[in-house]
Amino acid sequence: MKINRRTFNTKLAAGLIGAGLLPSSVLAFDSINRNQKKLGIALVGLGNYSKYQLAPALLNTEYCYLAGIVTGTPSKEQEWMGKYNIPKKNVYNYENFDNIANNKAIDIVYVVLPNSMHADFCIRSAKAGKHVICEKPMAVSVTECDAIIDACKKADVKLSVGYRMQSDPYTNEIKSLVKEQTFGNVQYVSSDAGYYSGGNPDQWRLNKKLSGGGALVNMGVYGIQSNIYGTGLNPISVSAQEFSTRPEYFKETDETITAQMQFPNGVVGNLFTSHNANANRLFVSFRRGWAELYPSNSYGPLAGRTSEGKTIEFPYKPQYQQTFQMDDFANHILKGSTNFAPGDMGKRDMIIVEAIYKSIKEGGKTIPLDLGDMGIVKV
């Protein structure tokens, strides 16, 4: 089992060194970085994802920390200030947000708002001179993705998409099996990503003006990503079908979508995404075996196995994937390391999303894609 250094924090690395599993140079590397500035992150939007995932994850990050918040709910200000020791000067609302440009304590803005608001606040963050993490999907259209990318380039700030799975060690083990052809060439890939939505019919994800779509833009991007790193390539065409069994609940947004993705090496990938069924699996079939992650896209811990009868596992206590994700981006800013979820990756996935919707509209027609290596991160 290959253990990727970037997926471990300092304490873990020290423990593994003591056990003889990692070289002492890893600890030396981390000691150097501890002397560097920790980057301050401001969360824009304090919904469930910020509250239960991002904020707790930032308690364990090595290279960044929770420095500020942006919320439209005054009652949340005192709660978060007290819980995370955030000074009043680092608290903003949506009206005075642009003043964040004058706050040197905040280096990165993480936009965690409804999808239709991503472009506006990412662009404003870039204009304020702040590095940007945009939660997935990057935007509600390819045009908006371009606007975000252009704004960040113009302001000379770094941009990342909130693809936490790109920093997860289980995901990276699948990438390694594919890249090194451990079981030969990939012949088939299948990804499932969905959950049952039976609660609040007024949630913003069911409002197309706010979400830009349904299951596909929410969970489907996990499936798109899984099929891509399960083959190591971008698709060259896609066809798709939509199903609805609860139209009274999913009035504006897609409930369930299946898609077929063809890759340049002849591999076919199947994708299933839904807001009406629990689904959480990646299966990769190779010439001489297979590998599976199940679950493959939840908050963890993940689990995996291969056709050799071996489990895919790592000798550490599970941590928030977002801890790895945000530390990776902070290291990218501080040291110029790899950006594992760059803006063109988010744009690529939105190109595929738009092609899937187009295929559905045209009765399942195959839609060609010309993506080249767009969004493929070489490590």
Image (cartoon, rainbow, N blue to C red):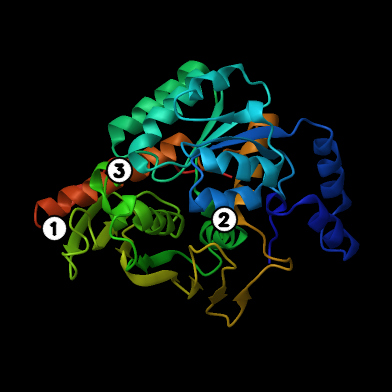
- Rounded to the nearest angstrom, the CA distance separating label 3 from label 1 is 26 Å
Q: Position of residue 97 (x, y in %)?
A: 50, 25
Can you identify the residue that label 3 sits on? Answer: 210
- Helix, strand or loop at mark 3: helix
The residue at 63%/57% (across/down) is 320
Q: Position of residue 349 (x, y in %)?
A: 36, 45
Mark 3: amino acid: Leu
- Rounded to the nearest angstrom, the CA distance separating label 2 from label 3 is 22 Å
Q: Earlier in the sequence, mark 3 or mark 1?
A: 3
* Left or right of 171 in this view: 204: left
Question: Which numbered mark, 1 or 2, is in the foreground of this view?
Answer: 2
Q: Nearer the viewer, residue 142 or 114?
A: 114
Q: Earlier in the sequence, mark 2 or mark 3?
A: 2
Label 2: few (<14), some (14–19) or many (≥20) C-alpha neighbours in 10 Å: few
Can you identify the residue that label 2 sits on? Answer: 52
Is residue 166 shown to the viewer in this render?
A: no
Mark 1: amino acid: Gly
- Helix, strand or loop at mark 2: helix
Answer above or below: position of 335 versus 319. above
Q: Quadrant of the C terminus?
A: top right
List the single residue furthest toward the left.
363
**Label disc, if present, on residue 364 of the rendered structure:** 1
Q: Quadrant of the N terminus?
A: bottom right
Q: Nearer the viewer, residue 114 or 222?
A: 114
The residue at 54%/48% (across/down) is 50
Q: Quadrant of residue 31?
A: top right
Answer above or below: position of 285 versus 361. below
* Left or right of 209 in this view: 324: right
- Helix, strand or loop at mark 1: loop
Q: Quadrant of residue 338?
A: top right
